[in-house]
Image: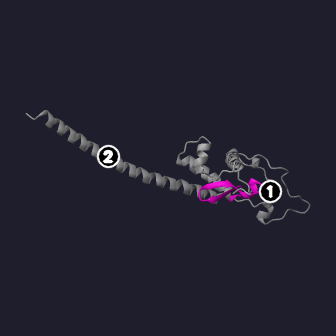
Amino acid sequence: MPSVVGLLEQREIAARRRVDGLVEEADRIQAELAVAEREWQEWAIARSRVGEVLAPVDEPGQSQAQADGTAPAMGQAEETPSAPTAAKVKSQVPVWREGLDRSVLSVDYQRILQALADRFRLHQGPLTCQEMAVLFGLDVVPARVEALRSKAKRLVARGWLAEPAPGRFTLAAGVAGPGGGS
């Protein structure tokens, strides 16, 4: 009959082997998860960039007739908007120009501008999209961060924001007012 200590040693060895096997499996799954998450982030960035490329760009001061290459008919006045109206959901981001109020932007874009204006006023540096997500009380998951990054990049492309370093955003010089926004 085997001794009690011998039986305990056998069970300990069996348990250790099971733990080692589970640790190896966990490491393999962890590595697979990291690869899958990187791939997912790359696709999210690609989708965001395609959206930016496919978004129409409005040239400031260019009417639809000028864009088409046609001139308004004689005696017909070209329509000029009297005042900027509040943007609708999923609206275009206009190119920033002097005197254009941020109220022309949708609420999400206004929120980003307000956060960066507060940082500028407090003489703090640029924000990353992860920091914005935390500031807005969003879950800091890749989907939320990439959505913010897409909006911030669109604001950079339209002259509302500047990106002094990759992934770090601040108000553009004109938007920040006299003295610049960097």
Give the residue type at disc 1: Glu
Percent x, y of residue 159 = 71, 58
46 or 169: which is nearer to us? 169
Q: At numbered mark 1, what does the secondary structure look like: helix, strand or loop?
A: loop
Q: At numbered mark 2, what does the secondary structure look like: helix, strand or loop?
A: helix
Q: Residues within 10 Å of mark 2 (few under 14, many from 20)?
A: few
161 or 55: which is nearer to us? 161
- The reply, left or right, for residue 65 in relation to residue 30 is right
Q: Residues within 10 Å of mark 1 (few under 14, many from 20)?
A: few
Q: Tell me the residue at 47%/54% (across/down).
A: 38
Sequence-wise, the earlier of marks 1 and 2 is: 2
Q: Tell me the residue at 61%/49% (across/down).
A: 148
Q: Which residue is mark 1?
A: 98
Percent x, y of residue 19 = 28, 43
- The reply, left or right, for residue 147 in relation to residue 182 is left
Highlighted range, magenta:
157-179
Q: Which residue is mark 2?
A: 23
Give the residue type at disc 2: Val
Residue 111, compared with residue 76, is above or below; it is above
- The reply, left or right, for residue 102 in relation to residue 36 is right
